[in-house]
Amino acid sequence: MAKAKYNWPKRGTTSLIGKQQDRVDGLAKATGAAKYSYDINPPNVLLARALGCPHAHCNIKSIDLSAAAKIPGVIKVAAMKKPGDEIRWQGDPIAVVVGETEGAVAEGLKAIKLDYEALPIFVNDEDLAAAEKADRASGGGGNTQLEKEAPEGTDEDKFADQEIERLLKESAAVVEGYYGIDVITHMCLEPHGATCEWEGKQLTAHLSTQNVSGTASQFATPLEITADEVTIHCDYIGGGFGSKFQADTWNVIAAKLAKEIGRPVKLMLDRDTELKTAGCRPSGYIKVRIGADKDGFVNVWDSHHWGTNGSTPGGVGQEVIPYVFNPPNRRRKRTTILTNASPTRAWRAPNHPQGCAMSQTAYDDIAAKLGMDSYDVFLRNIPTDPEDEAKILKHDRYVEEMKIAARLMDWKAKWHAHGKGPAKGSVVSGLGMAIHTWGGGGQAGGCLIRIHPDGGVEVSLGSQDLGTGTRTVINMIAAETFGLPIEGVTVNIGSSKYPRSSASGGSVTVAGVSEATRRGSQDSLRKLCELVGKKLDVDPTTLVASKGRIFVEEKADKGLSWKEACSLLGMTPQEVKGEFQRADDNHLSSSIVGGVQMAEVEVDKDTGLIRMKKFVAVQDMGLIINPRGATSQIYGAVIMGIAAALFEQRIMDPTSGAFLNAEIADYKLARLGDIGEIVVELYQPDSEYERGVVGLGEPPAISPCAAISNAVANALGVRVPVLPMIPSRVLDALKKARTA
Amino acid sequence: MRAFEYAAPTRPTEMLELLADYPDDTAILAGGADLVPLMAKMIVTPRRVVNIMGVAGLGGIMSDSQGVTIGATTTLDELLESRLMADYPAMLQAICGINSDALQATGTIGGELLQRPQCWYFRAGEGLLAGGGRSVAVGDNRYHAIFGNGGPAKFVSPSRVAPALIALSAQARVIGPGPEDESYVPVEALFRTPRDARQSEFVLEPGQVLAQIHLPPAGEAQNATYEIRQGAGPDFPLASAAAAICVVGGIVREVKVVLGQVAPTPWNAYAAEEAMIGQAVTLDTATAAGEAIAAQATPLSHNGYKVQLASVAARRALLAAAGLPTGGFDS
């Protein structure tokens, strides 16, 4: 057979794929009919809350629960830590109270008495010298690549020193820069938590999770049961962004207490504990020297970056320094800083937004130094080395996307040299850009396609819809394959009892579920066509499904309606498993995307306020199943990036280590009025369609910080070094530039 | 939230009686935008909550030759929609700046004036003065006071409308604790800077209720509020100013400039007023007036930037009051 066993319909022949499709669950979500994990309230449910430790660093001497247990309405109190345990961040859960009402639980939490020994606190991750003095800094690796090899017998480090100094000296422009980006949190609207209920030995955890198929054993092991006795259920999740892959200790305790008490227990973190303990992103600060030739090509990069991963070592990896660009001579050093803060969790495109913000800003400063258009400097530095192209987007694709973005932004007409634009009162405007890359290939997973004799179709898989539109994508693919309208297929996701599917992280979901669903649906249709072929006495391979019928492709009147075809199944449904392995020879999905983003901002020099005027996001993602969903994803990513560039920041008390703004009112995010005009362009020439589906979730969230920082630098002629660019930092940068 | 007694009186005498039973342990509920979150976090744990929204005579907006009288339970939306407020743009601009349909629909003028500070040490349960001011002094005080912060109180007065009301010389009618007790005080006299942990930031005694606000006729006075808000949401401004000016023959004859979000009380910017009086309002004179306030500022370790913001807010409020362009983003 010449045709691949699995394939996508030829472009332009589809009825659903590639068409603007509303979310199939949009109405349910908008009306409240959709039940999020937080909405699950089984009869007789008890409420529970976790108490976060109020101290940022201490040894626990004792946790006295006796007064809490006596509060009317409190059913059970349990410690999550024991004497001798070291607490390393404020908000680390130390106890759980279960009660009949929220009030009883709140009073119970207040009555818990903690005796502790205070330990030294360190939270200032930006201050490298202070971290070294406090013995909180440690080497985190580094490496050097030089065009010239060290001569035989010379000390390599010494040679690198000399070589880098020589290259900098020979550069037409050198920038010595400092850049950074603070820790931010995930701020999921729905906090982490679960409602746990038992039926005999069977546990059902209604868990707010990005990992429906992968969490059962995380409950089972500590509860001393096996994973077959656990069902994870999550129909709708109110945000995860990388922070909800785990069962989490507090959910396991909720399950344990539900068993002991004999009633369902609901434990969702309160906002304070959620922000303090359930997910944040590493910070990154960098000192860099960078040298370029007169055309803006960066020939040498020499950097030292640091930041914190919280109370565990880690932070932004060096592989994203500099980001996307790969100068021929490069030395990078990394230091990790331990702080009394919660360990980080994966945050939408881990490492990339920080790497982009710490390095593409320096490239923009090269443009400023040379008096060049930033666009030309970026263009000049896109890697063309085939070795790089294997890892990142192809050079010509970036160039195309840059052209499109520039047209949509009207870049050339609006461009002015850094700090040289006209002012209106105290308001100046500027342009900035950044580029990014990401993987997004699918992970192994399966699905079950069930065709009922009455024509009903079900697709079942243990995936989850993070709000990205996964449910709609699965529905579109199955309906397209069977020639049915979108309503002709029911999608079942959100239970670990369905065929396993991958966790939603790394932008792997859409490629994975598309592979499994299309494969299963094509196999299922082939099987059904065998019955139809027999009935019509035609070769089943000549049959196609379209517009609610199965018929001979070349002879449309020879066929059956979908219902008639399904009735050939007799009494029992047909079940076919769809299956995808990463090693499969596939034509349905691919990996590696790029993207180009441009920002236009206005800055009030007297107040330091920044307003977004326009933002352009050009994004490729291979074959696009649902352009409306993809566009919406990109809007969300850009808005998240605007928040990180201008507003979001974890603020720690320098002395007590308290997380001061762990409240929705204090943790500032971008609101609708703050985002300006956002223009999204889905880049999908035929070459993209042909490479199949690639994930999109993370990549468009990478570039905004650097693009907006560059736009502010272009407006002011001064770099605001650390993000978020809050008014105090803008005014500080202007003041420093004035006094310099 | 701790369990509490709830009462919803309809008559003023009944209200005052309900407040008198445990005067130190009773909270007044109006819109609830501030009280409810404080109770949810158990920062405030009253034994009794008295809802005054149904009390006769505490709502509504009335006008006569003496000016405009606003009942304390009048919602912010009612003020925005009232034609009687047309001469007081400083008030309307301050309310619009709140940028929240929910807060404007449920929030009352009385509650807006008497809301508790946003200081994150206070809201984390450290008390209003948070260790006699020490937590703020050595901590992150980016949003804290730059004026009047020499004592233990370093929070900022959060009210958005108080600077406008003070600039417009508004009076407050206070009733209670006794059924016949009644007094009139300038709105600015409602506020005080607490000197110790026993004092609150308001002069109202337990059992007293803010009943009405009275605004004198605006007459020839032009007025405006300019807030410096980082974003378009309901976040509090970083600094704000309300200005009321009386210009005769192109020269400022009377002027009031009141700053918000910069001190434990709304802050009279006398230096700006002195600089402005007898001058025509221009970009230069307004800039000089704004900059004049900086001399008295005593910024903390992390809030020096607020001195500039307060200066700019004062300048722009004066320009806006005079009907001139502010030169920055629209407030």
Image (cartoon, helix red, strand yellow):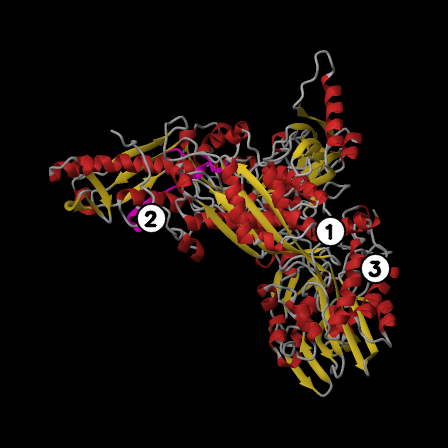
Secondary structure beneath dot 1 equals helix
Seen in the picture, residue A306 relative to A71 is either above or below; the reply is above
Label ID, residue A730? 1
Characterize the local packing of mark 1: few (<14), some (14-19) or many (20 or more) Cα atoms within 10 angstroms: many
Secondary structure beneath dot 3 equals loop
Residue A247 belongs to magenta span: no
**Front: mark 2 or 3:** 2
Q: Is residue B252 left or right of residue B2?
A: right
Query: Can marks 3 and 1 be said to lie on one chain?
Result: no
Measuring from the top left, give residue B246's x and y in whole percent. Answer: 79, 79
Seen in the picture, residue A264 relative to A430 is either above or below; the reply is above
Magenta residues, as a range?
A487-510
Characterize the local packing of mark 3: few (<14), some (14-19) or many (20 or more) Cα atoms within 10 angstroms: many
Characterize the local packing of mark 2: few (<14), some (14-19) or many (20 or more) Cα atoms within 10 angstroms: many
Callout 3: residue from which chain?
Answer: B
Measuring from the top left, give residue B178's x and y in whole percent. Answer: 74, 75
Q: Residue furthest bottom?
A: B65
Callout 1: residue from which chain?
Answer: A
Label ID, residue A16? 2
* Quarter of the image where the N terminus of chain A is located: top left
The residue depicted at 60 percent of the width and 69 percent of the height is: B8
Q: Kindly identify which residue carries mark 3.
A: B147
